[in-house]
Image: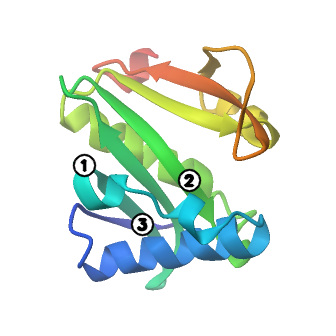
């Protein structure tokens, strides 16, 4: 089972681990440019980085951007390193994010999913909320999930 840490500080070691995971997955594996992966959001907007660990090894990450009213989190930069895949870490990451968001009164989670990951997000209860579009040359759809106070009533 994974443990999770969060940070809002780009100087924190947790952020550096998140950035490393993202570089491995998005730049080295998927071929994105470094300047596409690391954007201005990390230099000027409120954001929360989540990193999941197994035996103190950082293996999965996501970035959360709260909307101005605090009712919605935009989930971005979701990534799991190759050796962490197939262990349920993505699902654990999203359960952590949903719990973290509920504790802060967030009512909705939104993400722009690469089409290759749509089934994964649908299994977690996310629904497609937009027509398809291309981002950085890859097909995506916006997806969302409404959070309830008591997840057992979902």
Q: Which residue is mark 1?
A: 45
Question: In this rendering, would 78 be left or right of 152?
Answer: right
Residue 85's label in the rendered image is none
Please state the horizontal and vertical placement of residue 41, each as a whole percent of the image: 35, 52
Name the residue at 47% across, 55% down.
Answer: 62
Q: Is residue 119 above or below residue 50?
A: above
Q: Is residue 28 visible?
A: yes
Please name whichever residue, 9 or 133, is drawn nearer the observer in this view of the structure: 133
Q: Which residue is mark 3?
A: 51
Q: Tell me the quarter of the picture where residue 80 sits.
A: bottom right
Q: Earlier in the sequence, mark 3 or mark 1?
A: 1
Please state the horizontal and vertical placement of residue 43, each as a whole percent of the image: 28, 61
Question: In this rendering, would 128 be left or right of 106?
Answer: right
Please state the horizontal and vertical placement of residue 154, each as a whole percent of the image: 46, 16
Q: Residues within 10 Å of mark 2 (few under 14, many from 20)?
A: many
Please name whichever residue, 39 or 54, is drawn nearer the observer in this view of the structure: 39
Q: Earlier in the sequence, mark 2 or mark 3?
A: 3
Name the residue at 22% across, 48% down.
Answer: 46
Q: Is residue 60 above or below residue 75?
A: below
Given this view, does label 1 or label 2 mark the residue nearer the observer? Answer: 1
Q: Which residue is mark 2?
A: 78
Q: Residues within 10 Å of mark 3 (few under 14, many from 20)?
A: many
Circles 3 and 1, Cβ within 8 Å, touching? The answer is no
């Amino acid at each position: 089972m994974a443990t999770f840490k969060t940070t809002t500080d780009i100087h924190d070691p947790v952020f550096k681990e998140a950035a490393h995971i993202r570089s491995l997955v998005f730049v080295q594996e998927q071929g994105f440019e470094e300047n596409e992966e690391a954007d201005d959001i990390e230099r000027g907007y409120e954001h929360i980085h989540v990193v999941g660990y197994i035996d103190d090894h950082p293996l999965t990450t996501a970035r959360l951007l709260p909307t101005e009213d605090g009712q919605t989190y935009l989930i971005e930069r979701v990534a799991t390193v190759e050796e962490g895949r197939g262990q349920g870490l993505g699902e654990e990451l999203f359960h952590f994010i949903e719990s973290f968001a509920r504790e802060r009164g967030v009512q909705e989670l939104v993400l722009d999913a690469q089409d290759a990951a749509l089934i994964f997000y649908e299994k977690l209860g996310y629904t497609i909320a937009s027509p398809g579009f291309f981002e950085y040359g890859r097909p995506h759809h916006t997806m969302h999930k409404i959070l309830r106070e008591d997840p057992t009533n979902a």
